[in-house]
Image (cartoon, rainbow, N blue to C red):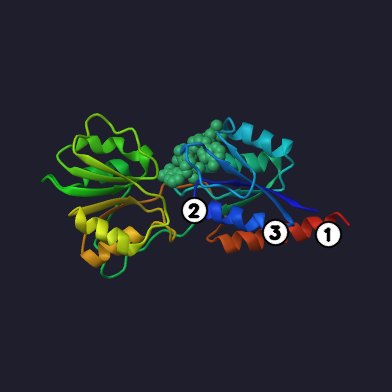
Amino acid sequence: MTLRVLILGGTFEANELARRLAADARMCPTLSYAGRTANRRPALTPIRVGGFGGANGLAEYLKREAIDVLVDATHPFAVQISGNAASAAASANVALIVLERPAWQPGPLDRWTFVPDLYAAVAALPSDPSRIFLAVGRQSIAPFAAKPQHHYLIRVIEPPEVPKGLTSYEIVSQRPPFRCDIDAALLRSKRIDLVVTKNSGGTAAFAKLKAARQLGVPVIIIDRPVRPSSAVVESVDDVIMELDHHHDTLAKRSV
Ligand code: NAP
């Protein structure tokens, strides 16, 4: 028997999980994307793309596809889909595993200022014109138009729609994982004064923070929103351990 697993993705860890489950004959994974980026990495598992139509739509999908375990491996800032996952899993009576990578913590050499949200990040920018490395994702750029005196180096996976008010900017299209030496060279060559990022956590996008530490560049770091998750695991290995357990339980029940 195989365990039918739906992975809610859009993260480096979700791709890694899908890759590992694809190599495990006991697992039958499907990877779900919201469809925000057009150029996805080739996946080894079946994928589906687009919203489910809210929590009810997701619950319907879980039942129709006879999903045994739902893995919420979405980004820590993706609040809506995680809420939907929790209520859909409960109403469809499907086991839920929430994978949430630990938040980044500053070391003694880091110059981080924590802010509660995107608007507070904009408010915390200096008033004098500065050169700012913006690593907040393509959907979160618009509020920075309120401070057009700065030059923004915007790193995104795919080119965003830049808000009209933002006049001085450059786009760098790059996909994680990133490297510290390359990010340090980027910050240096672009004469960056300040980095702004979400506290995404994980290893794939930590390079910019290491680079900022090496160069003594200050960072504004946006705290995570509260997500409705009770029990969370922190790594792909932990998810696989839980899935092994679910598989064994199901296998025992079916003999
Ligand atoms: P969100 O606000 O939490 O979700 C909005 C809606 O998008 C959901 O209600 C759902 O539509 C759909 N959706 C989200 N993730 C989905 C998935 N994996 N599969 C199918 N439908 C999904 O999400 P978001 O913050 O816009 O993030 C969208 C995607 O980008 C997520 O997959 C997330 O992992 C990834 N991502 C987000 C960020 C970020 O900073 N927010 C950063 C990196 C990656 P329905 O209600 O119709 O089902």
Q: Secondary structure at mark 1?
A: helix
In this view, the residue in front, 251 or 214, is 214
Task: Decide if ligand 1 comes within 8 Å of the CB at mark 3.
Answer: no
Q: Earlier in the sequence, mark 1 or mark 2?
A: 2
Image quarter hosting the C terminus: bottom right
| Circle on res. 252 | 1
Hey, which quadrant is residue 173 in on the image? Answer: top left
Label 1, label 2: how many angstroms apart (C-alpha)? 33 Å
Label 2, label 3: how many angstroms apart (C-alpha)? 19 Å
* Badge 2 amino acid: Phe
Q: Which residue is mark 2?
A: 12
Q: How busy is the neighbourhood of tag 1: few (under 14 within 10 Å), some, or many (20 plus)?
A: few
Q: Which residue is mark 3?
A: 24
* Badge 1 amino acid: Lys
Q: Secondary structure at mark 2?
A: helix
**50 on left or right of 89:** left
Q: Residue at x 31, y 43 (%)?
A: 118
| Circle on res. 114 | none
Q: Position of residue 139 (x, y in %)?
A: 38, 38
In this view, the residue in front, 180 or 55, is 180
Q: Relative to 243, is 131 above or below?
A: above
* Badge 3 amino acid: Asp
Name the residue furthest left: 128
Q: Residue at x 59, y 63 (%)?
A: 238
Q: Relative to 226, is 235 above or below?
A: below
Q: Earlier in the sequence, mark 3 or mark 1?
A: 3
